[in-house]
Image (tube, helix red, strand yellow):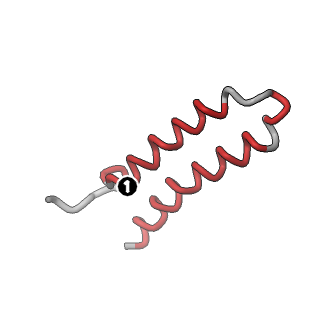
Amino acid sequence: MEPAKNFTDLVMWQNAHKFVLEVYLYTSKFPKKEIYALTSQFRRAAVSIAANIAEGFKKI
């Protein structure tokens, strides 16, 4: 297997990105009154996973 040249080549990042898309789809069905509370918290947490993987790749 060839080493990853970019963080987007990492299978773990690809899975994290899919997770973000699923979280956005799922939270879009939450009540509108939760848009700045629970919805926002779920989305930020999901995005953080992918962002941390990308940031860690940069340090290698």
In the displayed structure image, the side of residue 33 where residue 58 appears, left or right = left
* Screen quadrant of the N terminus: bottom left
Q: Circle 1 sits in a helix, a strand or a loop, which is it? A: helix
| Neighbour tally class for label 1: few under 14, some 14-19, many 20 plus, Cα within 10 Å | some
Residue 43 % position (x, y): 65, 44
Farthest residue in the bottom direction? 60
Residue 28 % position (x, y): 66, 28
Residue 10 % position (x, y): 32, 55
Which amino acid is tagged 1?
Met
Which residue is located at x 21 percent, y 62 percent? 3
* Screen quadrant of the C terminus: bottom left
Farthest residue in the left direction? 1
Q: Is residue 9 above or below residue 36?
A: below
Which residue is located at x 81 percent, y 43 percent? 37
Which residue is located at x 81 percent, y 40 percent? 36
Q: Quadrant of residue 39?
A: top right
In the displayed structure image, the side of residue 44 where residue 59 appears, left or right = left
Residue 32 % position (x, y): 80, 27
Q: How many marks?
A: 1
In the displayed structure image, the side of residue 46 where residue 41 appears, left or right = right
Farthest residue in the right direction? 33
Give 19 or 55, whichever is nearer the viewer: 19
Which residue is located at x 66 percent, y 34 percent? 27
| Residue denoted by label 1 | 12
